[in-house]
Image (tube, coloured by chain):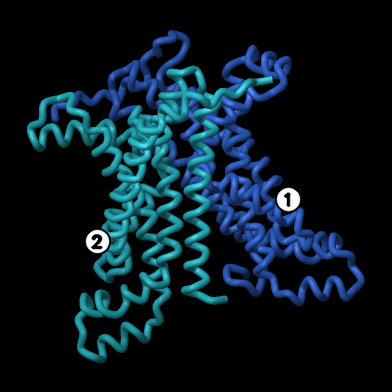
Chain colours: A cyan, B blue
């Protein structure tokens, strides 16, 4: 039987914590940019201007058809070259974290925009008609009446997507960036204790995501008492 | 940027000599499809079972099913994959573990990937099946029981024939996801589509052509699956429900 040896974990905790900070940093940027850009995409998609609606539909469908791993590989290939040229940075500057953040943000906006589009569509039509009757412009109606109600309905879904996003950040492994999972893998590989470190990483993700989704479920009950 | 485009690269003989780079891509595509389909069949069977158990009146069965779903939904796919691939063989009894580790590495990668994708997806399928069962009016179950059916009979003849037809549309997106998620298996060295794409970058130094080809292949898979599932959805739609005839 395999003999477990957990002794390499306590000493590695600071390093793992640094990794966790990277995971959380990527999650937070992607959630914030994803919601802002996703809202714009959703509004474009629902707009009566054909080119805008087509662009948004194409963007969302493209990103939703391609695996996240592929998107990340694309961004690790293109973004560093692009940014180096744009800001005149010396080649070989470590832009993996920036690339990961941009990649996740643009990828997740496609998913967020679908949630937000459904949220906007769930607001009764009479609300928009009432705004027009009161003399509000489209922008005012969206900002003051429609979006506040839509977002209230969407909070649980947006948070659930954030939990999925947090799990997905482990895929930055493909760029050898030391996020929490990358850090755990490195420690396990160095000490020959991959089994323990992988199980530890799985347990940590489980505790965080399970706790977060329990909180989201509570919120859901509070917003929509069944 | 002054990038030298060279699409002819796919027709060049590959580094291994017996194939073209296009051949590498196609073998990756085959692997992606074989892996996703086999994992999908397992996920459907397991997911249907767990989904039914979640609605069971027995607390232990329902509790087990809930724990199963929570376990597979709250750990990232990549971590699950590494646990199947690196951890499980170590925890097996030594004789079985050693025999497994000496088997064909490609077989090991494929098995770990298939089991991982199947169980990961089955938890999501189970949630859809449960939602389908719960969406049926309570009267259906009560009517079955009132007619003298036992609970298993009620499931077998009344609830499941309806529920399975209702869950087909939401399962389409899970089916699409399993193809996309199979790209994660490139991380343990399985030579599926994404892995072949990266290998092509290393061998040909034509990153854009390789990545574009792989991306287009995923788009094609996506379009094909959507087209086929729309036909299936149309066939099984329940008359009288939204989307029904």
In the image, is residue B89 above or below residue B178? above
Residue B170: percent from the left, percent from the top? Answer: 57, 58
Residue B3: percent from the left, percent from the top? Answer: 18, 26
- Camera-side residue of B25 and A187: A187
Q: Secondary structure at mark 2?
A: helix
- Camera-side residue of B22 and B123: B123
Residue B223: percent from the left, percent from the top? Answer: 47, 47
Give the labeled residue for mark 1.
B49
User: In this orientation, does residue A216 appear?
Assistant: yes
Q: Is residue A105 left or right of residue B51?
A: left
- Camera-side residue of B5 and A167: A167
Label 2 crowd (10 A; few <14 / some 14-19 / many >=20): few
In the image, is residue A6 above or below residue A34? above
Say which of marks 1 and 2 sits in front.
1
Among the 4 quarters of the image, the one containing residue A178: top left
Residue shown at the point (28%, 19%) measured from the top left? B205
Among the 4 quarters of the image, the one containing residue B88: top right
Give the labeled residue for mark 2.
A51
Residue shown at the point (72%, 56%) measured from the top left? B62
Residue shown at the point (42%, 59%) measured from the top left? A159
Instruction: Assign the C terminus of chain B to one quadrant of the image.
Output: bottom right
Q: Chain of mark 1?
A: B
Residue B159: percent from the left, percent from the top? Answer: 76, 65
Instruction: Assign the N terminus of chain B to one quadrant of the image.
Output: top left
Q: Is residue B196 left or right of residue A39?
A: right
Q: Is residue A3 left or right of residue B157?
A: left
């Amino acid at each position: 039987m395999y003999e477990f040896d957990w002794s390499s974990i306590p000493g590695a905790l600071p390093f793992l914590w640094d990794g966790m900070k990277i995971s959380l940093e990527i999650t937070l940027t992607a959630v914030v940019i994803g919601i802002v850009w996703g809202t714009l995409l959703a509004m474009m998609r629902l707009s009566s201007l054909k080119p805008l609606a087509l662009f948004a539909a194409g963007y969302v469908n493209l990103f939703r058809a391609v695996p996240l791993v592929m998107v990340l590989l694309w961004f690790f290939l293109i973004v560093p070259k692009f940014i180096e040229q744009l800001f005149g940075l010396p080649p070989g500057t470590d832009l993996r974290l920036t690339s990961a953040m941009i990649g996740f943000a643009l990828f997740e906006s496609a998913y967020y925009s679908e949630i937000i589009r459904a949220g906007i569509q769930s607001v009764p039509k009479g609300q928009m008609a009432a705004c027009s009757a009161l003399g509000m412009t489209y922008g005012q109606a969206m900002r003051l009446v429609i979006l506040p109600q839509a977002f209230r309905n969407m909070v649980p879904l947006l948070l659930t997507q954030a939990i999925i996003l947090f799990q997905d950040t482990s895929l930055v492994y493909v760029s050898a960036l030391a996020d929490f999972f990358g850090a755990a893998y490195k420690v396990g590989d160095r000490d020959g204790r991959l089994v323990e470190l992988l199980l530890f990483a799985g347990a940590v993700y489980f505790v965080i995501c399970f706790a977060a989704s329990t909180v989201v479920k509570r919120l859901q009950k509070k917003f929509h008492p069944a | 940027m002054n990038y030298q485009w060279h699409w002819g690269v796919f027709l060049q003989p590959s580094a291994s000599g017996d194939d073209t780079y296009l051949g590498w891509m196609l073998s990756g595509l085959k692997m992606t499809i074989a892996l996703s389909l086999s994992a999908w069949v397992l996920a459907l069977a397991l997911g249907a079972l767990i989904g039914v158990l979640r609605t069971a009146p027995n607390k232990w069965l329902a509790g087990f099913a809930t724990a199963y779903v929570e376990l597979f939904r709250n750990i990232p796919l990549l971590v699950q994959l590494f646990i199947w691939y690196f951890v499980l063989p170590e925890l097996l009894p030594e004789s079985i573990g050693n025999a497994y580790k000496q088997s064909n590495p490609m077989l090991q990668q494929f098995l770990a990937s298939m089991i991982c994708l199947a169980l990961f997806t089955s938890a999501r399928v189970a949630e859809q099946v449960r939602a389908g069962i719960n969406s049926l009016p309570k009267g259906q179950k009560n009517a079955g029981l009132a007619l003298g059916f036992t609970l298993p009979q009620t499931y077998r003849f009344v609830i499941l024939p309806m529920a399975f037809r209702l869950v087909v549309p939401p399962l389409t997106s899970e089916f699409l996801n399993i193809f996309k998620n199979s790209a994660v298996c490139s991380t343990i060295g399985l030579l599926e589509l994404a892995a072949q794409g990266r290998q092509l970058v290393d061998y040909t130094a034509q990153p854009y052509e390789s990545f574009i080809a792989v991306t287009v292949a995923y788009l094609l898979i996506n379009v094909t699956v959507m087209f086929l599932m729309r036909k299936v959805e149309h066939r099984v739609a329940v008359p009288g429900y939204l989307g029904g005839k």
